[in-house]
Image: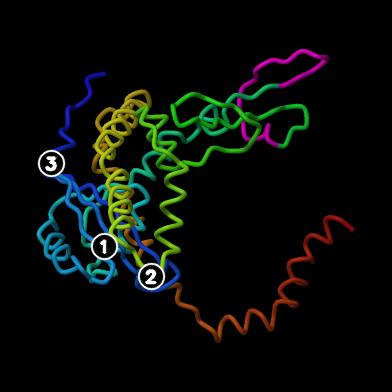
Amino acid sequence: MNLKKIDFNSDEYIYIDFEFRDSHQKNLTLVCCSLMQEGNMERYWLYGDEDTNKLKQRIEGLRDKTFVAFAASAEARCLLTLGFNPIDFKWIDLYYEFKQVISGDNSYRYGPCYRTKNGITTKVHTSPSYTNSDDVTIQKRVYNKDGSLVEVTGGEMAPSLVNALLSRCKIDLDPVNKKNMIELILGAKTFDVLDRKLIQEYCDEDVVHLPTLLESLYAALSWKCWTASKKDQDILAIMRFRARHAAALAVVESNGYPIDFTLLDNVHSNSGMFYEEIKKPIDKMIP
């Protein structure tokens, strides 16, 4: 397969990540943003609106570019908070693309799977159905900070940025540091100079490796299309189309779901009747 060469470090791609809090509110409380174009990292401290106007002007000038993020609905919500409609922008969501790549790959999702019978342990084909089997041990893969593999009994691997970078790019982010920084961002009442430095560096770390991950996922999805005899598909166009869902989801998450309370009350008051009507055909089949 001759993979079409694409420069993912060109000015077309804007790699972006926000840190924020108050995700239960319509408008988020933005803490900081890291934005990278052509390998140049830009940092914006947003807590207290310090660099907010500067960032808004920068984003306004990037409307024709493609924004790339991992779990882009969060970044799209941050754009909403800044006063932009994320649906007006082009997106690539690497979370969605990573999910596409590992779809059907149970060896990644569940790790090695073993069955022991009559004292003999053999490796078996991994499948979600095995998770409910008493005689099968599912091994979830856990990685040390140095990248060495530890296998412990567990469930499905989370499709997180840490796991995506490690499995696709052999890049090891420290999950303990990630946990500590999230606690700082969400829990601190104020941020001192050191806090700001650590948070901004943490935000940078979530951005700097995104071009490498995008390139890896693009290659993997191109190979999937090739082997499925869909050689002429425009992978980037499909990525952008898929990410429209993330932008729309951000709007729903911010605005909530519209509820017709009159209809809802009607459903509740008649739920007993619905239940009895549903039961009738079942009762006839099973006396």
Residue 82, x across and y down, in percent: 24, 69
Name the N-terminal-most of marks 1 and 2: 1
Give coordinates of residue 111: x percent, y percent.
57, 28
Q: Is residue 209 left or right of residue 189?
A: left
Kindly identify the residue that appears in the image at 68 percent across and 31 percent down: 130
Above or below, comparing residue 190 to residue 179 in the picture: below
Q: Amino acid at mark 2?
A: Ser
Mark 3 or 1 closer to N-term?
3
CA–CA distance in space, label 1 to label 2: 12 Å
Disc ID at residue 15: none
Give the secondary structure at mark 2: helix
Residue depicted at 39% across the width and 67% down the height: 252
Question: Label 1 belongs to which residue?
Answer: 86
Q: In the image, which is nearer the foreground, mark 2 or mark 3? A: 3
Residue 192, percent from left and from top: 31, 62
Q: Residue at x 86, y 55 (%)?
A: 286
